[in-house]
Each structure stands twice: as C-alpha cells, then as structure tokens.
C-alpha cells in the first residue's frame, strides 16, 4: 500500500488496511476525539442556524400587515417604473431627468382595491405626484388617451375593499418581481 502521513503526528507510515487513517493507537484515540469534537461543533452550528430560522420566522409573524403591503407596493412600483420607462409623465406629459414615481390615479387611501392595479398606476414625475397631489385633472385626460374612457370610468367606479392577508401580499410581490425580471430580460 501507498505511504500516508498521519494527520495527528505528521509521521509517514504504511497503513495495514486501506481505511487506516493514523499511524498508531494513541494517534487513533486523538483522531477519534477530534472527529467527535468536529461533529459536535457541526451539530451546534446546525442547531444555531435552526434557532436563527425560528427566531426569524417569529419576527416575521410579529410584523404588521402594512409591512407586507408596503413590500408588495415597492415591487409593483418598480415594475411600473420599468414598464413605463422612456414615457413622459402621465400628468404633465414631459420627460424628466429627475426622480420619477409610480403615481396612482385613484389614491391608495381612497381606493385600496386598486392599490396594485396596473391601469391605476403610471409613471409620474416627482413634482406632479408629490407637489401637485397627483395633478389629477391632467392625469385623467392623458389616462383616457392611454387606456380608453371605458377603463378610466371603471377605475372611477366603486370597488369593494379587499381583505388581503400576508400570503396575498407575498404573492403580489413575487409576481411583480418576476414581471420586472421578464421585462428587463426582454429588453
């Protein structure tokens, strides 16, 4: 058999059996202790990782629904900004080099059912969205040109308030991240 180097004392030896790892019985005892300690350390690391996962899950359960709703809104807004990239502001019809938002025609507070609806959200410049409270009159005029009067009237109608749960928000977030990925990949 081929000569090996003992991992404990670094002495070169010729093993008597193919699975022999060390040169002598004292080295075998020390090697076994090292292996046992490695397994214990590995088991402790796994237990700590499991504890961290449990803690993370518990912390996630403590987060309010608004946290998950906001995460979903961030994903939807990112998709809308990418979808409308290169288009002018829906309200003032100008191309802006500054910050642009995903502006809602019907506000999230006034019509929560349309919070994530694509027809209700379009690229809007920061001044129109923030300083001019959405510049609604101009928004409506250009929205009719963009999606048609029937869809705008549908947006202006009454819609039942949703009763979304955490899973709904997670689904919305995941769907819009996937849409964004596909949109960016398609360009």
Image: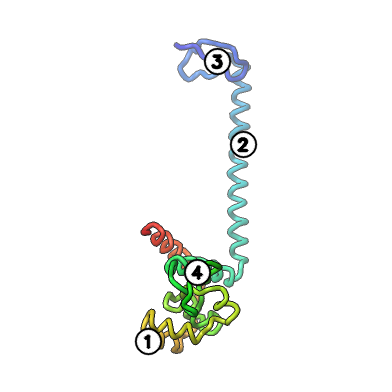
Indicate which disc, 1 or 2, sits on the residue closer to the N terminus.
2
Mark 4: give few (<14), some (14-19) or many (20+) Cα within 10 Å.
many
In the rendered image, which quarter contains the C terminus? bottom left
Which numbered circle lies on residue 5? 3
Residue located at (50% from left, 69% from top): 77
Indicate which disc, 3 or 4, sits on the residue closer to the N terminus.
3
In the rendered image, which quarter contains the N terminus? top left
Indicate which disc, 1 or 3, sits on the residue closer to the N terminus.
3
Indicate which disc, 4 or 1, sits on the residue closer to the N terminus.
4
Helix, strand or loop at mark 3: strand
Helix, strand or loop at mark 2: helix
Helix, strand or loop at mark 4: helix
Q: Position of residue 74 (x, y in %)?
A: 53, 67
Q: Residue at label 2? A: 40
- Of discs 1 and 3, which sits in the foreground? 1
Q: CA distance from mark 1 to mark 2?
A: 69 Å
Mark 1: give few (<14), some (14-19) or many (20+) Cα within 10 Å.
some
Q: Residue at label 4? A: 77
Q: Are marks 2 and 4 in contact (CB under 8 Å)?
A: no
Q: Residue at label 1? A: 149
Q: Are marks 3 and 2 in contact (CB under 8 Å)?
A: no
Res. 152 in view:
yes
Q: Position of residue 35 (x, y in %)?
A: 59, 29
Left/right of residue 151 with respect to residue 58 in the rendered view: left
- From this view, report whether residue 137 is shown above or below residue 45: below
């Amino acid at each position: 058999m081929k000569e090996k180097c003992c991992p404990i004392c670094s002495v070169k030896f010729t093993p008597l059996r193919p699975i022999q790892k060390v040169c002598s019985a004292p080295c075998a005892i020390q090697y076994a202790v090292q292996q046992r300690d490695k397994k214990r350390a590995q088991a402790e690391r796994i237990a700590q990782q499991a504890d961290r996962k449990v803690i993370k899950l518990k912390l996630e359960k403590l987060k309010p629904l608004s946290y998950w709703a906001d995460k979903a809104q961030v994903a939807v807004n990112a998709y809308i900004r990418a979808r409308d990239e290169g288009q002018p502001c829906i309200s003032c019809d100008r191309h802006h080099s500054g910050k642009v938002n995903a502006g809602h025609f019907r506000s999230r507070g006034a019509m929560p059912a349309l919070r994530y609806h694509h027809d209700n959200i379009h690229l809007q410049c920061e001044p129109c969205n923030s300083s001019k409270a959405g510049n609604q009159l101009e928004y409506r005029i250009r929205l009719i040109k963009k999606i048609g009067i029937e869809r705008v009237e549908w947006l202006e109608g009454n819609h039942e308030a949703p009763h979304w749960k955490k899973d709904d928000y997670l689904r919305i977030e995941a769907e819009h991240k996937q849409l964004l990925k596909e949109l960016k990949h398609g360009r």
